[in-house]
Image (cartoon, helix red, strand yellow):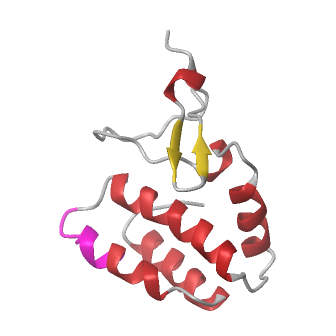
Amino acid sequence: MTDPKAMAETIGELQFVPDPAYPYPFPVEVAPHFWMTEQTGKLATVVEAYFQGEELSVAQRKVLVTYLQQYVERALLLPGVKRHLLLQQLPALRSHRDFEAFADDLADVGIEPF
């Protein structure tokens, strides 16, 4: 069995270590990382602020966009969903409402990053 730490991946300023007890449930070439498996603590802090409805700073938005980008790039999509159109929306996310609407759009197409 492969040591999860050997499968660590750095994406931007985030460090992910897959949790074998919480695998991505769909067959994909490269599975997206879940926010809870990020090791620096930066993402957890940002996600908690987002869950609390706080407006995010520029740095926090960058962290959240980095996470969402890797998730959307790797997630299994329903037939007909255009990944590139979802990814194009990421740079425009500014407010809590923007992120919430984007998360709702993702949920509508079967992507649940949170």
At x 59%, y 82%, the residue is: 100
Q: Is residue 16 above or below residue 74?
A: above
Q: From the viewer's perspective, is 103 left or right of 44?
A: left
Residue 16 part of the magenta segment: no
Which sits in the foreground, 98 or 66? 66
Q: Nearer the viewer, residue 89 or 78?
A: 89
In this rendering, the answer to whether 7 lies above or below 1 is below
Q: Position of residue 69 (x, y in %)?
A: 44, 64
**Residue 81, position as x, y percentages in the image:** 24, 70
The answer to which of 84 and 111 lies nearer the viewer is 84
Snapshot quadrant of residue 27: top left
Residue at screen point 49% across, 80% down: 102
Report if residue 85 lies within the magenta region: yes
**Residue at the image point whose x is 47% and y is 40% from the top:** 24
Does residue 45 appear left or right of residue 88 in this picture? Answer: right
Give the residue furthest to the top.
1
Q: Nearer the viewer, residue 114 or 62?
A: 62
Total numbered labels:
0
User: Residue 63 location, x and y as percent?
Assistant: 61, 66
Residue at the (60%, 31%) spot, across then down: 19
- The magenta-colored residue range is 79-86
Quarter in which the C terminus is drawn: bottom right
Apparent side of residue 104 relative to residue 38 in the rendered image (left or right)? left
x and y, in percent, of residue 54 in the image: 79, 83
Residue 18 figure quarter: top right
